[in-house]
Image (cartoon, helix red, strand yellow):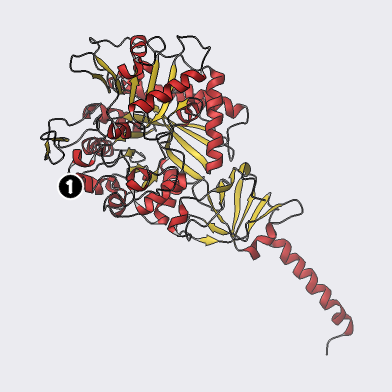
Amino acid sequence: MSHPQFACQRPLALAIISLLSAQAHAAPAADTVFKNGYVYTVDRHDTVRQAVAVKDGRIVFVGSNRALARYIGPHTRQIDLRGKMLMPGLVDGHVHPLTGGEGMTKCSLDYKPVTVAQLQDKVRACLADKAGTPDSAWLEVVNWDRQATVKLDRDPVKADLDAISQQRPIIVTSIDNHSRLNNSPALQAAGITAQSVNPPGGVIGRAANGEPSGMLEDGAVLLSDNSKPQASDSEQQRFARLALGKFGEAGVTTFLSALSDEREVQVFAALQRQQALTARAQFAIKVTPDEANDPVAAVAGVKAIAAKYNADAGSQPGIRVSNIKLWMDGVLQAPAQTAHLLAPYRVEAAKDKHAEWLPGQQLGEGYFSQQQVNAVLLQAARQGLDVHMHAIGDATVRQALDAVAHTRSQPGLQDFRPAIAHAELVDPADYRRFKQLNTSAVMSFQWAQRAPYSVEAVEKQLGKQRYARMEPEGSLRRADTRIAYGSDWPVDPMAYFYNLRVGVTRSGDPQHPAGFGAEYRGRLNLDPLLSRADVMRAITMHAAYELRLERQVGSIEPGKYADLIVLDRNFMRAPLAQLAATRVLLTIVGGNTVWRAPSFH
């Protein structure tokens, strides 16, 4: 029989043991917790959890509502998701933020199909809005769907803009940023005449008599870029703030500016100093074909920029120069057809709608030699930089892969993460090489929808076999390629979840603003579809890997930065018809809220 004194002490002892046990398992109180959610982690197994805890800008817990309790203190902010989807912040592996932000301030054709006359009317209206400005002031027009104009009417020339003004320089830039229409004053300001030669990496369009037509392609666009007035530092910062505002609303927490220079890096670095940088900013510095003739100097220049700006910002958004950009060819679409192909583009045998299309002579443009690409990649790898290559045609994709193979064959250079952006046409013999060479394919899924640029501008010009495998995201995925996502904004409207839906269906939504109407309903071609998990991983973990950030962002796991977004619907379970309408309700970067929808409490 127990002694009465010990019997009285036993409950107290048990209470003490219980308290000590609880203290042993106690965790520091979190700054913020999320509970009652569908937490799509994008970890190795795409695990779904209920709750997340954040402290000091990092994720400290992912698990159940019950286990979350030990992270809640008297000052912890509690967000009840009420079943909504929480996922990692979006990582855009190929975007042009300053161009996009600047475009928001310019005369815009809004990606809409227009005839030449409608284009002229819009330009006149924009000039009327600028009444009172000097006749020498440039008018810049953006977001022009050139392929749609060609389909509806014809390809415009400088005379179409000269009819509006022969005093004021006017330039109209296509949505793909590969083509620009100039009037005569703009050509004159750029010093372009009948005697001008094509610049490296570009083409000056010409009329039958050899005179400039007004159209500039690829590297030739820089001729007018360099002649027009340059935005001031304060204007550039305004453009960057506009882009960051769009990113926050869209859920983008990390991005790669895919065609950059030191001035752009300076702009975002200034915002970081002002504590106005709301997304993690990475930059791919362009190396031109001329610069590639001295690869040691070219890579050293990029390395110097990286040394000047790269710094560890911890969990908060920072600046990192990590890549060299090679713009290696142009676009597949007619009338430009500057993407480099293994076999020629096809041409009409006669001007008859029933005429046969036969192989022509045009292979497109390859802007770098194999020797140049090999040398730049090798030197970049030696200096600890990665290379981001614009390669659209199958010949250029092969050239890029051959250069990667050359680099990987050298001893001691295996820690190298090359990426090929766009890869719209890949020879099937090269599908498996992406995996074999550990090369990421950075794809823009929205290009796999039916549109003027993906039907009339390429279908007959490529021929049946090549068109059937255009935009090979599914084929690359079947070959176990790491596919990262890049929006290429402002080439397309900023519509991330619409674009992810296209990745899943290879078709557009005629009712969505980013779609092309009922005329373009249906699937692009029969290349395999991606799963929802595929597209989610592409815009999170795979893009993070591309940028060497897979240990910091891209999934919801303890120790990673708290870059998180809340969606208004469950992208993984919602009906396909609803996916394009997905909206971001909350965007958090490094534990700090950078965007909140008014409806989210």
Can residue 517 be seen in the rendering of this structure?
Answer: yes
Between 118 and 25, the one lying in front of the other is 118
Residue at mark 1? 465
Label 1 sits on what residue type?
A: Gln
Between 354 and 315, the one lying in front of the other is 354
Q: Is residue 281 left or right of residue 467?
A: right
Which residue is painted at 85% across and 77% down in the image? Answer: 9
Which residue is painted at 87% across and 79% down in the image? Answer: 8
**In the depicted structure, whether residue 274 falls above or below residue 427:** above
**In the depicted structure, whether residue 238 falls above or below residue 591:** above
Between 252 and 419, the one lying in front of the other is 252
- Whole-percent x and y of residue 254? 50, 39
- Whole-percent x and y of residue 294? 29, 20
Q: Is residue 276 left or right of residue 379?
A: right
Q: Is residue 278 left or right of residue 425?
A: right
- Whole-percent x and y of residue 194? 23, 11
Residue projecting furthest to the bottom = 1
At numbered mark 1, what does the secondary structure look like: helix, strand or loop? helix
Between 193 and 304, the one lying in front of the other is 193
- Whole-percent x and y of residue 64? 60, 63
Which residue is painted at 32% across and 9% down in the image? Answer: 191
Can residue 449 be seen in the rendering of this structure?
Answer: no
Structural crowding at the residue carrying mark 1, measured as other residues with C-alpha within 10 Å and reported as few (<14), some (14–19) or many (≥20): few
Work out which quarter of the rendered image holds the N terminus and state it: bottom right
